[in-house]
């Protein structure tokens, strides 16, 4: 398909920019993407792409049937925004107060629509089906689960996703194999002690001291229980307790998250944390209870066939000078991983950082924006991957 994509930059840039800017101006929170979904549906239908029934209230599912029988490839983009007050200075900045496409999902939608446009023009050559999954609720880390539970992946043989990224320089794409984004599991720890006057600590059991010891013990878990060659992050992001300066605190709540790539370690996390918190609390004459919430597995590009298809597609389109597979693995998470648990999948990155243009802010920052000249690359890579997957079977 590379003969067709030689002019894709010129053919799609204006359309992609217009779509991206309209979507950026009107962001919506997870599972409230009603206007976004309507816009996406209209854009697909206006190009003659079939829109399928969607069992969910938001999100859009489109389909192109090739002229020949074959497998089915899924192409996914997330559509929700974040509760961030935008401070980007863009003329098309968010008009929805306190909501911003600070993670770049506006770009993901535009790139997928661009890929749909390319593939529609190649419909006569396609051997199989393309399913476009414009997914709601990614920022809640559970959107993909709804799509899996509602059998939207049924019949899909493989799926491709990508993320625009603020630490990867434009115009590079990253199609590296192996670890890409870490798992995510969250926890709440409730420590109970005994209240007493602050001047008589011997009459109470200080939950703040016990909770502080638990925080430090969790860091020792990272440095001593974990194999040092395995990336692991344990973060306590919330520490809440106490009511007065002169009262020994009886109750503390800790809330945190754990990120890793190790399936073996992840399997043991709940039991290991339980042992640490209960024994540490007991050493301080307190008790502790753990509420453990498994969330997302890791994003790991480990399907050899799909890895090869993605890497060859990038090289055909952009040459070795346009590919940077040295991008480090990230400890952030992505609910695309839930698709990876079900069917073969590949996840790519598109660079958006451009120091010369002052585009230096990262995803989830209130000033984050992108080098829009890379959008056509995301469309081209997505379309080429789908074309090659269907036509090389």
Image (spheres, rainbow, N blue to C red):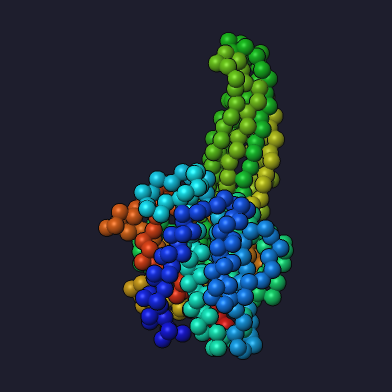
Q: Is residue 230 left or right of residue 358?
A: right
In the rendered image, the residue lying farthest to the top is 199
- Closer to the camera in the image, 95 or 247: 95
What residue is shown at x 41% (from left), y 54% (from top)? 92
Residue 341 vertical position relative to residue 316 in the rendered view, above or below? above
In the rendered image, the residue lying farthest to the left is 356
- Closer to the camera in the image, 264 or 351: 351
Q: Is residue 56 left or right of residue 1?
A: right
- Closer to the camera in the image, 220 or 364: 364
What residue is shown at x 50% (from left), y 76% (from top)? 117
x, y percent for residue 104: 47, 57
x, y percent for residue 194: 68, 20
What residue is shown at x 51% (from left), y 53% (from top)? 27
Q: Is residue 82 left or right of residue 278?
A: left
What residue is shown at x 56% (from left), y 65% (from top)? 40
Residue 79 vertical position relative to residue 223 in the rendered view, above or below? below
Residue 110 visible to the viewer: yes
x, y percent for residue 20: 45, 62
Q: Quadrant of the C terminus?
A: bottom right
In the rendered image, which quarter is residue 193 located in?
top right
Residue 148 vertical position relative to residue 187 in the rendered view, above or below? below
Circle count? 0
Residue 262 visible to the viewer: no
- Closer to the camera in the image, 211 or 379: 379
x, y percent for residue 55: 71, 63
């Amino acid at each position: 398909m590379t003969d067709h994509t030689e002019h894709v930059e010129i053919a799609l840039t204006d359309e992609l920019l217009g779509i991206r800017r309209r979507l950026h101006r009107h962001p919506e929170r997870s599972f409230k993407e009603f206007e976004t979904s309507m816009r996406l549906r209209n854009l697909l239908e206006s190009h003659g792409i079939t829109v399928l029934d969607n069992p969910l209230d938001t999100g859009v599912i489109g389909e192109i049937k090739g002229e020949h029988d074959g497998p089915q490839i899924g192409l996914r983009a997330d559509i929700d925004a974040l509760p961030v007050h935008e401070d980007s200075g863009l003329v098309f900045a968010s008009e929805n107060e306190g909501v911003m496409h600070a993670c770049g999902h506006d770009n993901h939608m535009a790139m997928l629509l661009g890929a749909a446009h390319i593939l529609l023009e190649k419909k006569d050559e396609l051997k199989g089906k393309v399913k476009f999954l414009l997914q709601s609720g990614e920022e809640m880390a559970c959107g993909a689960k709804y799509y899996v539970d509602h059998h939207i992946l049924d019949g899909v043989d493989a799926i491709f996703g990508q993320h625009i990224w603020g630490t990867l320089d434009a115009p590079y794409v990253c199609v590296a194999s192996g670890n890409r984004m870490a798992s995510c599991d969250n926890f709440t720890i409730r420590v109970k002690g005994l209240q007493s006057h602050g001047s008589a600590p011997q009459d109470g059991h200080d939950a703040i001291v016990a909770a502080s010891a638990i925080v430090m013990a969790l860091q020792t878990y990272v440095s001593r229980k974990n194999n040092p060659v395995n990336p692991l992050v344990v973060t306590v992001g919330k520490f809440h307790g106490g009511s007065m300066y002169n009262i020994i605190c009886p109750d503390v709540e800790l809330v945190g998250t754990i990120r890793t790539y190790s399936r073996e370690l992840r399997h043991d996390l709940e039991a290991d944390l339980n042992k640490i918190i209960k024994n540490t609390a007991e050493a301080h004459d307190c008790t502790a209870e753990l509420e453990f919430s498994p969330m997302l597995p890791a994003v790991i590009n480990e399907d050899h066939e799909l890895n090869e298809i993605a890497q060859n597609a990038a090289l055909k389109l952009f040459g070795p000078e346009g590919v940077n597979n040295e991008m480090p693995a990230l400890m952030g998470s992505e609910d695309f991983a839930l698709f990876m648990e079900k069917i073969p999948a590949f996840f790519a990155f598109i660079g958006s950082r451009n120091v010369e243009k002052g585009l230096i802010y990262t995803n989830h920052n209130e000033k984050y924006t992108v080098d829009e000249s890379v959008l056509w690359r995301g469309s081209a890579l997505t379309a080429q991957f789908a074309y090659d997957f269907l036509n090389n079977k």
